Amino acid sequence: MSEKQKNVVAKLSWWHSFPTLKSQLMARIILRARHPYQRCISLLRGRMSERHLQLLMRVCERIRFRLAPVETSLSSVPAPIPSSATVLPDWIVAEMRDLSAIEPAIHPSPELLADFHCWIPPADPYPAQLYQEMLGDFLSWKPQIVFLIPHLMRGGADLGTLHHLNLCCEAGLRVTVVITRDVKSAWRDRIPKQARVVEFGQLTRYVSEEDRRLILLRLLLQSTARRLHLINSELGWQLFELFGRSLVSEGIQLFASVYCDDINSYGVRCSYSTEYLPRVWQYLSAIVSDNRQFLIEIQRRDGLPAERMHALYFPSLPPIACSTTGGQKVLWASRVTAQKRPELLLEIACALPDVMFEIFGEADSSCSSDTLRHLASLANVRLGGSFDSFTELAARGNWGLFLYTSAYDGLPNVLLEATVAGLPVVAETVGGVGELIDSRTGFPLSPGADCAAYVARIREVLADPVEAMRRVTHAQDVVRHRHAWENFHEGVLSIPGYWPIEDGGALSLS
């Protein structure tokens, strides 16, 4: 055979084998289709609305399954598509033929039958793979308690979460922490090393909301933990609302922490306790808060039973410091959000040009950038950015007082830290603030106080450091006794059903 003939035969052989090569190549592409698809979705997530993103994902899934209908055997070979003649059962074709005497348009002609197609529902194994990937932290680890939290950012509620985690881990409990939002937590490294952490939000970023709920529900039902503690996670609240009865029927006790209501841009009350608590409370073994005032409020407005309410004052960990009053600078440190009213802080700073204000905190998207720019432009204001330790912050300068301008709150941990650091506090007695700051322990203002009232209080503190020191001393006495770590231990033990029982007795905290 000549060289030319050999080339012709080789080309013909390749041509005849092309369908096989094509099917093999298509199978490889389909098997790897999810990974670049996920990366594209990740890039688009910050540039598209959730509605349009879900629409794009559905279209991509349809294209993917159109190319390769998924069989239960997970074979890479596409399932045969039935012909149009076999799409409709014979009895339907017979009925169409009979009814065509009444409506000729439905006569089962070949042209009409050709318009019917067989649709094979996609069987996406991805949620099952995620479930299998996370199962070990709920089953083989044998946790005794699971915490459902949205994240661990710089904030009082997140610090309260850490108090609970530290307490449980110190007592030797096996703990699983489920972070439900797809975010990077600034305080992730503060979680005790003994606890298992499941980045549920990040792992499930490409599945639907319904699948996220069902995956988490199945993990919790399979878990050995008989206690779930929900702290500010919307996914957790949705789960308790939809499946609270199922969880409780399996012998799982549900606990939820609530701290205060929020106010939206229209001035309307909104919060998890507003939206979910009236529909969920019957499944909860206990409702926990860091202040009594909020528990009284939700009991008054929603009629919840008092025996399920438990005020659990957070501990103040740093040692009590000597009073550091005597300076003339004002310290403001908190999350810079609409709740903390930076616009009021701006008014106060403008009204006191002779007083230096140092402002620390991470700015939230709800805060007006114009307000921040105006604050930064003032000669008597210095913006210090975010902070991790209030104790270190308080030790930096000779402060005259700590200013707190929140419009609503629970019992802010930053007020405990300011008191421990020896700073007199000027704040409105909103929410649980009045449980720490009164005329004996600080410089309180009535809720809704205006700029002039704040200015007068600040002048009063700076003009009389001796009186300010006396009130700080009284406030430190309150913190020393009521917010001791031992009292937090006892408070947790007093919550019925919260603490596991082993060998006939409660686990020791010592």
Image (tube, rainbow, N blue to C red):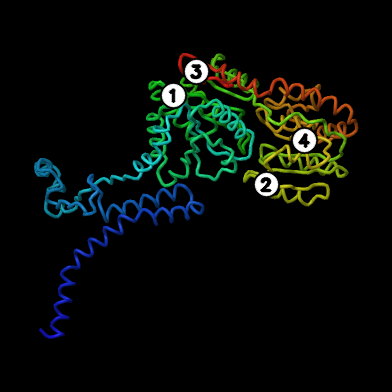
Task: Using the image, tell me which numbered label, if any, was put on residue 403.
Answer: 4
The 10 Å Cα crowd at callout 3, few under 14, some 14 to 19, many 20 or more, is some
Secondary structure beneath disc 1? Answer: loop
Residue 267 spot, x, y in % from top left: 63, 34
- Amino acid type assigned to the residue bearing label 3 in the image: Gly
Q: Which residue is mark 3?
A: 497
Q: Which residue is mark 1?
A: 226
Q: Identify the mark nearer the N-term, 4 or 1.
A: 1
The 10 Å Cα crowd at callout 2, few under 14, some 14 to 19, many 20 or more, is some
- Amino acid type assigned to the residue bearing label 2 in the image: Ser
Q: What is the CA distance from the residue labelled 3 to the residue labelled 2?
A: 44 Å
Secondary structure beneath disc 2? Answer: loop
What residue do we see at 48% from left, 41% from top?
Answer: 199
Residue 184 spot, x, y in % from top left: 54, 45
- The answer to which of 204 and 132 lies nearer the viewer is 132
Q: Which residue is mark 2?
A: 368
What residue do we see at 12% from left, 54% from top?
Answer: 110
